[in-house]
Image: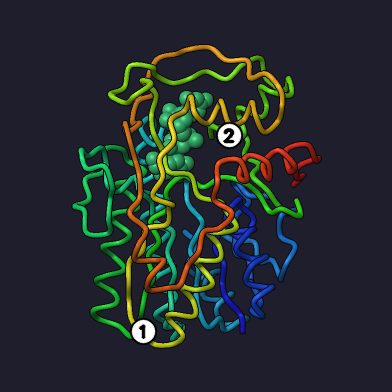
Amino acid sequence: MNVLITGGAGYIGAHACKALKAAGYTPITFDNLSTGWRDAVRFGPFEEGDLLDRARLDEVFATHQPVAVMHFAALSQVGESMQDPGRYWRENVMGALNLIEATVAAGCRHFVFSSTCATYGDQDQVTLTEDTPQQPINAYGGSKLAIEGMLRDFSARHDLETVIFRYFNVAGADPEAEVGEFHQPETHLIPLMLDAIDGKRPALTIFGTDYDTPDGTCIRDYVHVMDLVDAHVLGLKWLQADKGSRVFNLGTGSGFSVREVVDASRAVTNRDVPMTLGERRPGDCTKLVSGSARAIEDLGWSPERSTLNQMIADAWRWHQGKGYSR
Ligand code: UFG
């Protein structure tokens, strides 16, 4: 059974391809390699293409006749989305519209979408559930919320069922280190910290120490990428069992501050973490913690690898390898 994986050459998409192959599916990667890596496509065929090219999408649907689509491809940096909102609205939203229209035109009925906790924005609630009103404070979150709305409208009109996953902070790597997190430029906390630990950059800058949290740094809910992609396989099976469209948060329900992540990294690697204290980064929310009961209860998801120490240990193992080349 072929599954079309947009963004299959990226961090999360490549891990999803590995999990899908292990579950007996054939992942077909569709990627324009703007941020992904040819070398990360290791678990099924590769089709180079851009989501803004509808004819190319139609061709790939006709060739592979996928039973489902998993849509990972997107620009995904909060800070960049504040600097260049037009690019986020154009590439994320218009790319998704093309893909959804091509999916419907091809008669493909199942669609799994990577959304984000950034659609909730900065809210007072300790725990964000799927029913919390969505109020994004950055263009990245805004673009993902628009796509969620698009999927609802297409499902209402067409024979299309969707699973929407709102990710919290994805971290870690494949424990076998076949694939891992490798962004250029890197903007995420854990890989930047590992770079500082092994001297690839001078220091980690902590973005803001005056937030309204116990130690003044931002709190996030970190989820292991292997657990996250396991949820995608379960989501696909949910759709194939005709259980209908559903939205799920993917996080663990535990929040950690930036300083707590630094402390855990020091303990796991047994190395010093060079760091400096800096200004807040525009677009950052104070605290984002998931209510994940729905994925656990409805999908039978069990995020067992998502302890901070395990995520850092797996990321560290991958980090010490050679990464990818294009
Ligand atoms: N941080 C630092 N220094 C750095 C990098 C990050 O202090 O050099 C802090 C950030 O301010 C934030 C935390 O570490 O408080 C995590 O930052 P990341 O950049 O790793 O992750 P984000 O929370 O900004 O973004 C992630 C995903 C997005 C998703 C978002 C929701 O990358 O796709 O969570 O907020 F939308």
* Whether residue 65 is situated above or below residue 101 in the rendered picture: below
Report which quarter residue 278 is drawn in. Answer: top left
Q: Establish whether ligand 1 lies closer than 8 Å to the Cβ of label 2.
A: yes
Query: Residue 226 placed where, x, y %?
Result: 60, 58
Q: Is residue 87 visible?
A: no
| Picture coordinates of residue 318, whole percent (x, y) | 73, 43
Residue 281 is left or right of residue 170, and the answer is left
Rendered image quadrant of residue 281: top left
Out of 151 and 178, give the one closest to the viewer: 178
Q: Quadrant of residue 312?
A: top right
Judged from the image, the quadrant occupied by ligand 1 is top left
Query: Measured along the vertical axis of the image, is residue 102 above or below residue 128?
Result: below
- Residue 210 appears anywhere in the view: yes
The residue under the point 55% across, 46% down is: 307
Disc 1 or 2, which lies upstream in sequence? 2
Q: Label 1 amino acid?
A: Lys
| Residue named by callout 1 | 243
Q: Tell me the residue at 75%/51% (across/down).
A: 177
Q: Secondary structure at mark 1?
A: loop
Mark 2 sits on what residue?
190
Kind of residue at disc 2: Ile
Which residue is pictured at 38% across the width and 56% down the height? 166
